[in-house]
Amino acid sequence: MKPIQVGLLGIGTVGGGVFTVLERNQDEITRRAGRGIRINTVADLNVERAKELVKDRAQVVSDARAVINNPEIDIVVELIGGYGIAKDLVLEAIAAGKHVVTANKALIAVHGNEIFKAAHDKGVMVAFEAAVAGGIPIIKALREGLTANRIEWIAGIINGTTNFILSEMRDKGLDFQTVLKEAQRLGYAEADPTFDIEGVDAAHKATIMSAIAFGIPMQFEKAHIEGITKLDAIDIKYAEQLGYRIKLLGIAKKTPTGVELRVHPTLIPSKRLIANVEGAMNAVQVFGDAVGTTLYYGKGAGSEPTASAVIADLVDITRLLNADPEHRVPYLAFQADAVHDTPVLPIGEITTSYYLRLRVADQAGVLADITKILASHGVSIDALLQKEADEGESQTDLVALTHETKEKNMLAAIKEIQALKTVAGEVVKIRLENLS
Ligand code: HSE
């Protein structure tokens, strides 16, 4: 049978990986897909560089629309990124009746609802395994492997840059800015690392996972997002003394009143496997009512790991090409007419535990005042750590871990605590998840 014909929009690190892996493993891939998969044309503005990469294995053009409108091409792979031109091209490819594979998490998280509707109306497939956690087949696991379960929560280390920075801060006791510069020098962090360090990239990925896990539309605009830029090295140290690590987690949790969708630095017990995911690696922990806890670990970025996910989508589409569209795996794991409009909860309504660090006067009655305020808001203390005041100092650090409480109760208590004359500066608050 004639190989399926693929057009690539954009050829950089990932596109190069797709070429290399398809070529190296073509026999195995063909045995799995039932027919060959061939890259017919590549569109890239930098034609010279693209030709160097592709050699004579495919045509190279500068105009993406020459790929979209080419009747020979069955699948368009979008590797441009961002929500600008990439969105127009994906929608045009769908309108032209092409199946689409994309690694673009921003596009799916922000415009996925519109894209899936267009694809559904046209009867074409849109696949995006590479959009979340690179080479880890987490979309496949959530959408198919765990299909028997009511998924209760997902917690993921889904941004390698920030995990690398946090690992270095912990290992070397360095502050955020110093490690960020080192990460940029080593090429781990982008020249403009805003999306990574501010948690936006992780929020895109958490949004996609929440939609698939719970059968809800993409609701990126409702995600609560905090990055790691304000994280102080001292909190990493205190957390460690209490038996915890701080990770930037993407969390999606089903509750009786709605869905929690949030990205923020989080204390997790050091003994959890996921707490030991270091450097630029990614991991996603999923809790299903039938299966219990499952954990998926691997490379979240890079040429061949991401190509692994892109090619898996190409194989899936090839296998399902002749299936009636109603009998394919739905985009969001749930049938389109069974997607529920469950609300994403405002951050004040979420329930979690907390780590608090306060700078307090080292004098009688201070602790009593603080615990009284916490108790009056229904916040129960789980652990306390107080350092001896340094020689000649009249203030010291007080660290408290709380049991679970609603965020709005915690915020009200913090406001009152900050008003105490014996408490200096702002109370540092970091959320804590036991992941048990
Ligand atoms: N910038 C991402 C990260 C990789 O640091 O994990 C691509 O999603």
Image: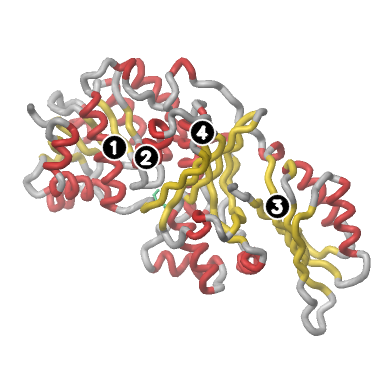
Check if mark 1's residue and mark 3's residue have beta carbons within 8 Å: no
Q: Nearer the viewer, residue 265 or 178?
A: 265
Nearer the observer: mark 1 or 4; the answer is 4
- Give the labeled residue for mark 2: 104
Q: What amino acid is labelled 3 in the image?
A: Tyr
Q: What amino acid is labelled 4 in the image?
A: Ala
Badge 1 element: strand
Nearer the observer: mark 4 or 3; the answer is 4
Q: CA distance from mark 4 to mark 3?
A: 29 Å
Nearer the observer: mark 3 or 2; the answer is 3
Q: With respect to residue 429, does 76 lie above or below?
A: above
Q: What amino acid is labelled 1 in the image?
A: Glu
Check if mark 4's residue and mark 3's residue have beta carbons within 8 Å: no
- Give the labeled residue for mark 1: 78
Check if mark 2's residue and mark 4's residue have beta carbons within 8 Å: no
Q: Residue 186 sits in which quadrant?
A: bottom left
The residue depicted at 15 percent of the width and 46 percent of the height is: 25
Q: CA distance from mark 1 to mark 2?
A: 8 Å
Badge 3 element: strand
- Give the labeled residue for mark 3: 354
The disc at residue 179 is none
In the displayed structure image, the side of residue 320 where residue 361 appears, left or right = right
Q: Nearer the viewer, residue 275 or 73?
A: 275
